[in-house]
Amino acid sequence: MGNYVDSSLIRDEHVVYEAKNHWIIFISLRSLLTLFIAPLIENWTSEFAITNKRVVIKLGLISRKTLEMNLSKIESVNVDQSIMGRILGYGAITIIGTGGTRETFTDIADPMQFRRTFQECVDQH
């Protein structure tokens, strides 16, 4: 688990599921032009976690994008997968909050498991 998720856990909170970037991020023009350094940094600095209380996502090294949303404030987690994404096991997740907040994260490994774990956590509360 990453440093950001570890440091943001509150009392009686524990990580239930942690997702990773899919290896497909290494197959792009961007990765070739940066000699694979950009996807390495992206992979190293991205954290996707579901805890027993919330969803915590952190992206970026220098400029940082974070999402921390209580499970009760999330209306749905949508999964978008192309044909290639279904074959190789990657896709995008979109987290929709109660206030209309919509955040999309792409190239997540096994996005269906992310959504399934989220639904199981919500059902337990």
Image (spheres, helix red, strand yellow):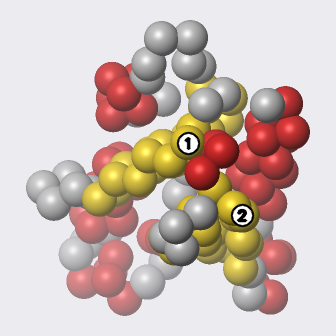
Q: Position of residue 106 (x, y in %)?
A: 53, 72
Q: Could you tell me which residue is drawn at 77 percent across and 36 percent down? A: 121
Q: In which quarter of the image is residue 62?
A: bottom left
Nearest to the observer: residue 36 or residue 54? 54
Residue 105 position (above or below residue 84)? above
Q: Could you tell me which residue is drawn at 72 percent across and 63 percent down? A: 76
Residue that numbered label 1 is attached to? 70
Q: Position of residue 3 (x, y in %)?
A: 33, 29
The reply to whether residue 109 is visible in this rendering is no
Residue that numbered label 2 is attached to? 76
Residue 110 position (above or below residue 49)? below
Q: Could you tell me which residue is drawn at 37 percent across and 88 percent down? A: 29
SS label for mark 1:
strand
> Could you tell me the amino acid type at mark 1?
Asn
Q: Position of residue 24 (x, y in %)?
A: 56, 71
Quarter of the image containing the C terminus?
A: top right
Lower position in the chain sequence, tag 2 or tag 1: 1
Q: Where is residue 35 in the image (x, y as percent from the top left)?
A: 25, 72
Q: Would you say the residues marked 2 and 1 are in contact, meaning their CB atoms lie under 8 Å apart?
A: no
